[in-house]
Image: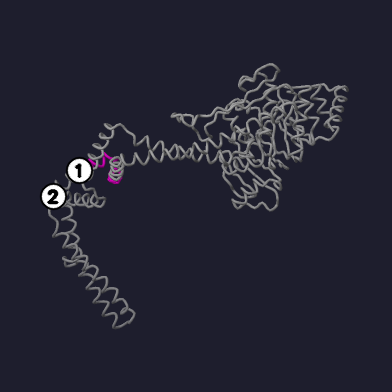
Amino acid sequence: MLSLLKIRNVALIDSITVEFGPGLNLLTGETGSGKSIIVDSLGALIGGRASADIIKGDCDAAEIEGIFSIADNTGIQGLLSESGIDVDSGEVIIRREILRSGRNRIFINDRLVTAAFLKSAGTFLAEIFGQGEYASLYESSEHRELLDDYAGLRLLRNRVSEAFAEFAAARDRLASLDRDESERLQMLDTLRFQINEISSVNLDLSEINDLEEGKRRLANTGKLTELSSEALSLLYENDDSTLSTLDRAMRRIDELATFDRQFAGYKEGLDAARAVLEDLSFAVREFAAGIEFSPSRLDEIETRLAEINRIARKYGGTVESALSHLEEAKKKLAEIESAEESKEAAAEAMAQARKKYLSLAGELSAERKRYASEYSRAVTRELKTVALDKAKFEVRIQSQAEEEENDASFGPAGIDKVEFYFSANPGEAPKPLAKIASGGEASRLMLILKTVARHDSAGRSMIFDEVDAGIGGRIAEAVGERLRSLAARGQVLCVTHQAQVASKADRHFVVEKAYSRGKTQIGVRLLDTAGRIEEIARMLAGEKITAAARENAKELIASSR
């Protein structure tokens, strides 16, 4: 149950706090007062989309927070406990921050969570039935969802979905192996050519560096000779070479050491320095002796580099990509060469996966058919509560025959096409739901279809956004009674424009728009008895409230007790 809602910096809302209670919570207000903003905020709180567009114009972020009582909601308790989120308090506090950058930060009981996790948690906390759902109500897939919800078939359907995924993967695997023979041979020729071409070059990542270094040395023999000769002269061969100068300095230090022992400590370091310089001199002399310009060797290196670069360019641009292509080509070649043997195994695997899928899908189909008539009767019975006394409702199921070769109608939800048929008038044959023209009938039918399907609310709040659109009078009275009976089983929140519905409220809130200093602000007030009379009178009479409207409002409230 949603007990508290806080909204800050959303659209025209600066900051509002609404305390909801058990039973029927109703929100009313003039058109454009901001009721839809509150419903949209609730949607974001339970996992709906929330973009930076909702942030109040001069603010950097928006924030929506809700407190849910979950003492009777075992579903959300289990989900949060499995995720390591504390639920001992019996409450869940969800806070969602929407930043101007488009990023969202979501917290459940102060634990940072993902949007996907919030959406999963939200399904246990509340469900919104909005005007936008009318379109989905005409789709066969939605009919199947509602029937499955009513029959409690979610677990079985998940197993069917997993089996379908296995079957689809096996089918795709077989299709990939079942190539035309000429295409297969052409692919074999191509792969063998590529493997031979790359392998013949004997690519080695370390060889490239060695070749490049050798090329640079051969191209710069003159400069290398000059540099090594000059370095050798400075280090060793000149009279004033570094080694000669160091030797003279060392002799002077030895003499100083006879007068002051502190200089004796430097002898070891000087000896080491001399050894390094001597080793370096020998290395330079050896390097200089090895310098030799060889045009033939340079040609050989350049030819080898050109060969390597040609293969690299052809197969991805680098030696690494060419070697990767070689391994991939070898793998594909092995697969194709063993294709005949693999095809038999793949065909058997697909047959087994298909058999498993059809077995589970058949079980699911049988359960749907078993519950279809029960759901039909339950909906027909409940339609009477919303002034559709003569209405007929049927669930029709068309299944893909198991023996048919065509698997096109197989899917993760099973082999059934479920379609609802409806007739509002006696003597009129039920027709597909999509052919219903009356908006008032559609809104009432949606209310019944959804609430009957979700007969076990399991602690979830039910939120209706103008589900009474397009009706009035006696019918609005019936819808109000239906909402109140639902609220007896669990919390209901409802946005309404109907006075007859508003009179049924356990808690009645009015959403108002105010203007101050050139700014528009939205507020929400909990109405007392006098406030309810005034608001319902406004709903009845319009802008100019009459004494008769107030009396009518009092009668509506009194008759609803």
Q: Is residue 196 visible?
A: yes
**Relative to 365, 269 lies left or right:** left
Q: Are marks 2 and 1 in contact (CB under 8 Å)?
A: no
Callout 2 amino acid: Arg
- Give the number of marks: 2
Q: Position of residue 499 (x, y in %)?
A: 79, 26
Residue 47, which numbered label? Answer: none
Q: Quadrant of residue 10?
A: top right
Q: Is residue 105 above or below residue 265?
A: above
Quadrant showing the N terminus: top right
Q: Which secondary structure, mark 2?
A: helix
Q: Position of residue 260 (x, y in %)?
A: 32, 82
Which residue is rendered at x = 62% and y = 36% of the image?
149
Q: Which residue is mark 1?
A: 307
| Residue range (magenta) | 306-325
Which residue is rendered at x = 74% and y = 23% of the image?
389
Q: Which residue is mark 2?
A: 297
Q: Quadrant of residue 30?
A: top right
Q: Position of residue 329 (x, y in %)?
A: 29, 42
Residue 309: say if magenta: yes
Q: Earlier in the sequence, mark 2 or mark 1?
A: 2
Majority secondary structure of the magenta segment?
helix
The colour scheme applied to this rendered structure is one colour
**Relative to 321, 522 lies left or right:** right
**Relative to 219, 329 lies left or right:** right
